[in-house]
Image: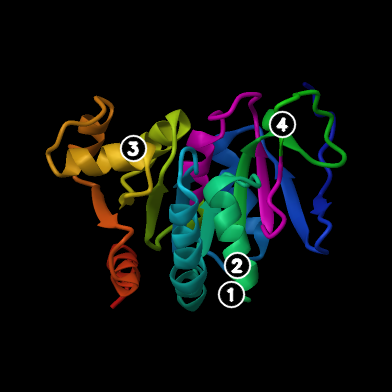
Amino acid sequence: MSTPSTPSSCEFANGNCASLHSIEQIDALPELVAKFGLDLPRPVLVIVGGAGNMSPETFERLGLLFKEVIAPFVDRLGAVVVDGGTDSGVMSLIGDARAASETSFPLVGVSAIGTIECPGIDNDNSDAATLEEHHTHFILVPGDDWGDESKWLAATATAIAGSQTSCTIVINGGSITWKDVANSVEAGRQTLVFDGSGRAADELAAELRDEPADDRAAPLVASGLLQAIDIEGDRDSLGERLATLLAIP
């Protein structure tokens, strides 16, 4: 896969036109995001995970949490959301929530260029995914495989937050989510695990309860940066937890 040039924007069928930026060096991220016109630094919420093996009921409940709690909270805070940018799983949830709640917070997707479909990009990957149409900015980073964007996603959040706070939320997720959580921990970022959402998130929550869990969970929990919240709990508690994690009085 080669990309001789990258278009400066991506126009979607819904009429949204998101800015599109490619980058080759991770240490150039602060300079890149400074050009976004977002009045940085700003608080950042990182969203990682998936939706594999998730029941329709759980997916619907999470959709309501995104629409009624997370999106309005982020908007009131003046924060930026950073995720993987493609139209699937939690990334589609936050995109749909941004549109449904009529909020206007910046939504930045970070994707490996060899894994996405976009007009003007030469990509012969049959497994390429479409970009989510409610995002405002995309950063396309080197890589042809899912997960190549992981360290870049964490670094983008750090570059946008600067002196402001940031946190990560983990919902469901598979092998790439483990990498995303590890990068969040390496960045020193507080991380909230959605217990009851399935797969990686539930394994991390089990380890937090000192119950049998995937071996990958122990070193992450040992960092002291992870905590869990039950998705079946009171919606108000989610807003309170996010406010605490982002140091909002």
Q: Nearer the viewer, residue 247 or 145?
A: 145
Q: Residues within 10 Å of mark 1 (few under 14, many from 20)?
A: some
Q: Nearer the viewer, mark 3 or mark 4?
A: 4
Q: What residue would you read off at disc 4?
A: 128
Vertical side of 223 occupied by 191: above or below? below
Can see residue 223?
no
Q: CA distance from mark 1 to mark 3?
A: 33 Å
Which mark identifies residue 236? none
In the rendered structure, which disc, 3 or 4, sits on the residue that comes first in sequence?
A: 4
Place residue 61 in its image quadrant: bottom left
**Horizontal and vertical percent position of residue 65:** 44, 66
**Horizontal and vertical percent position of residue 222:** 17, 37
Q: What residue would you read off at disc 2?
A: 98
In the rendered structure, which disc, 4 or 2, sits on the residue that comes first in sequence?
A: 2
Tags 1 and 2 touching, CB below 8 Å? yes
Whether residue 157 is in magenta: the answer is yes
Region rendered in magenta? 130-158
**Horizontal and vertical percent position of residue 238:** 33, 67
Tags 4 and 1 touching, CB below 8 Å? no
Q: Nearer the viewer, residue 90 or 222?
A: 90
Q: CA distance from mark 3 to mark 2?
A: 29 Å
For badge 3, the amino acid type reads Glu
Element class at badge 3: helix
Q: What residue would you read off at disc 1?
A: 101
For badge 1, the amino acid type reads Ser
Farthest-out residue, right? 120
Q: CA distance from mark 4 to mark 1?
A: 29 Å
Vertical side of 95 occupied by 74: above or below? below
Left or right: 131 in relation to 64: right
